[in-house]
Image (cartoon, helix red, strand yellow):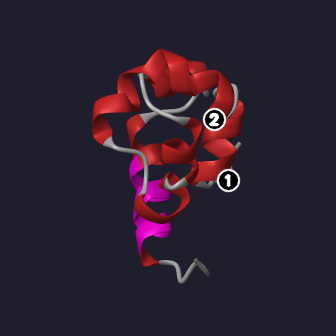
Amino acid sequence: MVRKLRTVREIVDAAGGAVALAPDLKVTADAIYKWDRIGIPDRYWSTIIPRAASNAAELLAANISARTQKVPR
């Protein structure tokens, strides 16, 4: 079965959401919300991958998509 690659927002939500992740990552929830535009910084991947039941390929694809989309500010 082929699984649809998720967006940054979907991955963050699967990992518990921005508010729940923020203290564990030592960042603000607002910083995490910006990832929709800039992608998930690689220094957080090791925490997010198991919590979101994801993998590096999915995070990379989500980051590329986030960085190439025109998102209203």
- Whether residue 38 is in magenta: the answer is no
Q: Residues within 10 Å of mark 1 (few under 14, many from 20)?
A: few
The residue under the point 34% across, 43% down is: 41
Up-down relation of residue 66 to residue 52 (above or below): below
Residue 36, located in which quarter of the rendered image?
bottom right
Pointer 1 or 2: first along the chain? 1
Q: Amino acid at mark 1?
A: Lys
Residue under label 1, please give it.
4
Between marks 1 and 2, how big is the CA–CA gap? Answer: 22 Å
Disc assigned to residue 24: none
User: Is 42 situated left or right of 13 in this image?
Assistant: left
Quarter of the figure with the C terminus:
bottom right
Mark 2 element type: helix
x, y (%) of residue 14?
70, 32
The answer to whether one can see residue 6 in this image is no
Does 13 sit left or right of 53 as displayed? right
Q: Residue at x 52, y 78 (%)?
A: 69
Side (left or right) of 71 relative to 49: right
Name the residue carrying label 2.
Answer: 18
Instruction: Report the span colored magenta.
Output: 60-67
Quadrant in the picture for residue 21:
top right
* Three-letter code, disc 2: Ala
Residue nearest the viewer, comparing 46 with 24:
24
Check if residue 61 falls in the magenta segment.
yes
Q: Main secondary structure of the magenta part?
A: helix
* Up-down relation of residue 23 to residue 73 (above or below): above
Residues packed near mark 2 inside 10 Å, few (<14), some (14 to 19) or many (20 plus): many
